[in-house]
Amino acid sequence: MSARPGFPLPVPSEDSAPFWEYLRQGELRVQRCLVCTAFAHPPRLMCPNCGSFDREWVPVSGRGTVYSYVVTRQAIHPSFEGHTPYATVVVELAEGPLLTSNLVDVPVDEVRVGLPVMVALVTAGDEVTLPLFRRM
Amino acid sequence: MESLRNRVAIAGIGETEYSRASGRSETRLALEAILHALDDAGLRREDVDGLMRWSVDTSSEAEIASNLGVRDLAWFGEVNQAGNVGAALVAHAAAAIATGLAHCIVIYRGVNGRSGRRYGRGEVTGRRGQGAAAFTEPFGLLTPQHQLAMVARSRMHEFGTTSRQFGWVAVSEREHANRNPRAMFYDTPLTIDDHQSSRFVVDPFHLYDCCLETDGGGALVLVSAERARGLRKPPALIRAAAQAGHGERGFVDTAAVSLAPRLWAQAEVAPDEIDVAQIYDHFAPYVIFALEDYGFVARGEGGPFVEAGGIRWDGGVLPVNTSGGHLSEAYLQGMNQLIESVRQVRGESTSQVEDVQLSFCDTGIGTGAVILERDR
Ligand SMILES: [Zn+2]
């Protein structure tokens, strides 16, 4: 999964910039509330659980399981031509949050709900590191 | 507080032909549909004092008003989400009329959804990796279809719904389209084997799970129930209209989980009192999910329900998408289904259900719904 056909790269925002910066430094961290300890992903400015602005970025194990997945088989946009099929997965991290991602080493026909996976950081361009996953 | 119940009506409906290439502008399509709707109601251009539209569309209220010759535009606005705001617009317009803020509101759209900007490619909804899309688009989750397929897989896993059951939605709706000369798939039969052997687009969605792409226009004219009773066609009374936006919900939950209790309470009816339903079938599986999340059937029972013919006009317990829906009539994102739900109340559908009192229309799997009632 080195080629990223026409997929936009993430544009960090005020509330999400630390997520991407930690990845660039080689670490997967997820936003958590300092007051009620609820995880929030995608990150927010305010805790949707308790209303606090006090957020922290906690390292997570990177372990998880495939919670759901789709396989794009038809090039529904011209920029996908020659790059299908590809699978997109939602991984449920051991700590609870759900992350949308791709698998680096699993053929699309072998992707299954429940597949155990581990994070694999992959650079995409000079500035961006993406949290992809590999089979455990 | 006084309820909205049956104080406002849809008095006029209008549409253009549905095609793959309209050959004219989106504003032109909207204007043609508006004229048809006003004529249907027996109203004139100068009666219009309100205009409402889908935020994703290109024809502004000002542009429509200046073409239509509206002298005093007392009420205008849009609901900002995606294609799924039709019922929300009806709710906003009905509230404005019930409170006297405007008297004759036209909800309109004109879209070149096939020859122009195509929803299916993410050309309307794509966010180029910004905002929350930073966490989905870089991984190839680029269109509404991708997001919806992800949830569909999860529901298949959790509730045992099958692709073949999705197929029965498509087949049932195609039967309805084959009775409707306006439908893009008129005179084009579809079998369950056609569905199952069609290619995957975004697996688990087969080609025939996916809606059409359509050029066309549609319009609704809303006035008070009292005024509607004196117009050309029998009024379709708005028994209830409600919307649901973003909320903290479970991964497999559609917005109908939030909307259903409010909608049924507002309408003071139960799901089993509904005679006919239009449901936002951007993708066939979502008809099943909506039937479940609105409470027409229990979770896990929607698949068997459609498989047993439950949504067919011919003998079904609850005929659904009687014009052919977005899968087989046209994809005007809820507009053509709102129009069909009015037809069912009037007795004008090509797949008319007998003695319709209550006609249900979902325009976004819980993002909004309208319940129309025949005047007694
Ligand atoms: Zn909190």
Image (tube, coloured by chain):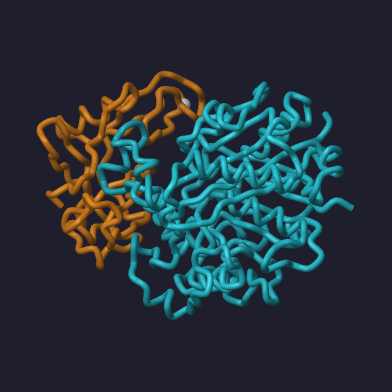
Q: Residue at x 37, y 23 (%)?
A: A55
Q: Is residue A51 visible?
A: yes
Q: Colour of chain B?
A: cyan
Q: Residue at x 45, y 59 (%)?
A: B212
Q: Colour of chain A?
A: orange
Q: Is residue B262 visible?
A: no
Residue most toward the right? B376
Picture quarter containing residue B42?
top right
Left or right placement of residue A81 versus residue B108 in this view: left
Q: Residue at x 76, y 37 (%)?
A: B223
Residue B85 is situated, as x and y percent measured from the top left of the image, at 56, 41
Would you place residue B183 above or below residue B304 in this image? above
Left or right placement of residue A25 versus residue B101 in this view: left
Left or right placement of residue A136 versus residue B364 in this view: left
Left or right placement of residue B26 versus residue B315 in this view: left
The N terminus of chain B, quarter of image: top right
Nearer to the camera, A32 or B20: B20
Nearer to the camera, B169 or B220: B220
Residue A69 is situated, as x and y percent measured from the top left of the image, at 34, 57
Would you place residue A33 above or below residue B276 in this image? above
Picture quarter containing residue B62?
top right
